[in-house]
Amino acid sequence: MKTIVPLILLFFGFGPLEGWCQKIDQQTLIEDIQYLSSDGLEGRSAMSEGNIKAGKFIAERFKALGLSSQFPGFVQKFRLEAGNQDMGQGTNFVGFIPGTVTDDILVIMAHYDHLGKKGEVIFNGADDNASGTAALLSIAAYLAENPPNHSVMIVACDAEEKGLLGARALVRDFPFPLEQVKAVINMDMISRSDDNTLYAVGTRFYPQFRSHLLDAAGNSPIRLVLGNDGAPGEKDWSKASDHGPFHERGVPFIYFGVEDHRDYHQPTDTFENIQQDFFIQASELILETIIGIDQSIP
């Protein structure tokens, strides 16, 4: 039981509040999460056929959006290594949108892999993390049409489930000095919450993001909680997903996610069990935060 409650920003409503401007293509967002969590992708485990299909889907979307990349074909290959064990090769997909004002970078990321199959049972990973990947693609579409002030790197990471291996490879071979990265925004599990709550992790370390989160939450019907970053009495998610390797290097981050639910890492984490309204609203809130950061950080 927590002894200290994180900062809660609570707003009531049954839909977007007046003045909220829809920027996400809702139909595409829902279609993308449905495809990425479909049986045909067999849970997207690193190096599996389903993982390869998901990667091809992401690369084709990056190309259709007109993104550039520092990696040929958007592909960053890396070795899947745990200790002294070489498990093969993983694949990150990296797109890039040049800034119109500064060469400083915002990194927006989500992992696209999941647990795959166990026997004939498919772990579809709709919330974990087809949700973050679908939001990543929709945010990329908006920013491609509305060029940002900062350069933006759009990253679909592989092998998060094997120990953040794709993110560690990205940090290790990052194509720019890490000092150019002003913010990492990571999305991992954002499509369902029984109590209408989305967490934003990182402001304990990087309080410069609080105002942007407050502004975005003020126009959202969902509840945003700032916390779970290791303050006394709180959980610590500061290294729980692909933002972790950046945080270890002192790169500022915000991690968006929900509490673990009954379907976490279960075969029941399927498209049918996401909450579409919450997912759309969470994606919009995250995009609004990104826009606020882009427009204000020098």
Image: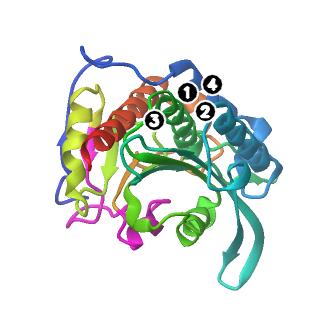
Residue contact at pointers 4 and 1, CB within 8 angstroms: yes
Name the residue that disc number 4 marks: 31
Residue 253: which quarter of the image?
A: bottom left
**Relative to 47, 264 lies left or right:** left
Amino acid residing under circle 3: Arg
Q: Which residues are magenta?
A: 224-251
Looking at marks 2 and 3 on the same chain, the residue that comes earlier in the sequence is marked by 2
Name the residue that disc number 1 marks: 29
Name the residue that disc number 2 marks: 33
Amino acid residing under circle 1: Leu
Looking at marks 1 and 3 on the same chain, the residue that comes earlier in the sequence is marked by 1
Residue contact at pointers 1 and 3, CB within 8 angstroms: no
Label 1 Cα crowd, 10 Å radius (few <14 / some 14-19 / many 20+): many
Q: Secondary structure at mark 1?
A: helix
Name the residue that disc number 3 marks: 192
Looking at marks 4 and 3 on the same chain, the residue that comes earlier in the sequence is marked by 4
Numbered disc in front, either 2 or 1: 1
Q: Is residue 194 visible?
A: no
From the viewer's side, name the closer residue of 138 and 115. 138
